[in-house]
């Protein structure tokens, strides 16, 4: 398919339910059979019109993942998987609450210890954030005894 108007229609349809990255929409257009030029033209037009914005996508995706209890490493990997460049990813992470605060919230009343530390690590929290969160958890536990 080479008609850029058709590519634009397919791309708009892909963006209707939620934000997507440029790479995600490009991949969808490629699967639909559009050539490189038609895809590029459609994507450029969507960016020009403000419908497609990787920085806005990165901020929304990072916020959603942070709300679900993920740390910076997982968020960064997820954004990269969607084709978000490092600067946009860093900007999105900077817009979140500090990682240590999010790690402390992710403890959700759990008993601080190695198992909880491992769980936070699997969710992408860095060592400093885990130490800060567990330290705060130990302090809270000591205050309640």
Image (cartoon, helix red, strand yellow):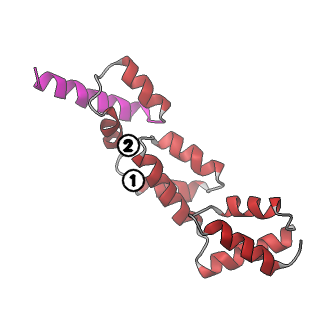
In what element is the residue under mark 1? loop
Residue 35: x and y, percent?
Answer: 87, 68
Q: Residues within 10 Å of mark 1 (few under 14, many from 20)?
A: some
Q: Which label is found at residue 75?
A: none
CB atoms of marks 1 and 2 within 8 Å? yes
**In this image, 70 relative to 98: left or right?**
right
Secondary element at tag 2: helix
Q: Is residue 37 left or right of residue 74?
A: right
Report the front residue among 31 and 127.
Answer: 31
The residue that appears at 48% across and 59% down in the rendered structure is 60
Residue at image position (79%, 70%) is 39
Q: Label 1 belongs to which residue? A: 96
Q: Dividing the picture into quarters, in which one does residue 115 lie?
A: top left
Q: Which label belongs to residue 99?
A: 2
Placement of 44 over or under 128, stated as above or below: below
On the image, the x and y values in percent for residue 47 come to 64, 75
Give residue 76's position: percent from left, percent from top.
54, 46
Magenta span: predominant SS is helix
Label 2 environment density (alpha carbons within 10 Å; few <14, some 14–19, many ≥20): many
Residue 125 falls inside the magenta stretch: yes
The residue under the point 46% across, 29% down is: 121
User: Could you say where residue 87 lies in the image, as x and y percent from the top left?
Assistant: 55, 58
- Magenta includes 13? no
**Magenta span:** 124-145
Q: Closer to the camera, 34 or 125?
A: 34
Q: Is residue 68 left or right of residue 15?
A: left
Give residue 94's quadrant in the image: bottom left
């Amino acid at each position: 398919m080479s008609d850029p108007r058709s590519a634009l229609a397919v791309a708009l349809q892909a963006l209707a339910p939620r934000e997507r990255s440029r790479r995600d929409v490009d991949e969808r257009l490629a699967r639909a059979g559009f050539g490189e030029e038609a895809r590029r033209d459609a994507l450029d037009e969507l960016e020009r019109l403000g419908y497609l914005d990787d920085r806005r996508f990165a901020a929304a995706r990072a916020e959603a993942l942070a709300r679900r209890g993920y740390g910076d490493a997982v968020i960064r990997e997820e954004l990269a998987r969607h084709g978000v460049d490092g600067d946009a990813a860093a900007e999105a992470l900077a817009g979140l609450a500090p990682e240590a605060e999010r790690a402390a919230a992710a403890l959700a009343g759990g008993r601080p210890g190695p198992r909880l530390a491992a769980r936070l690590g699997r969710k992408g929290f860095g060592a400093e954030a885990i130490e800060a969160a567990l330290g705060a958890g130990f302090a809270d536990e000591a205050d309640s005894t």
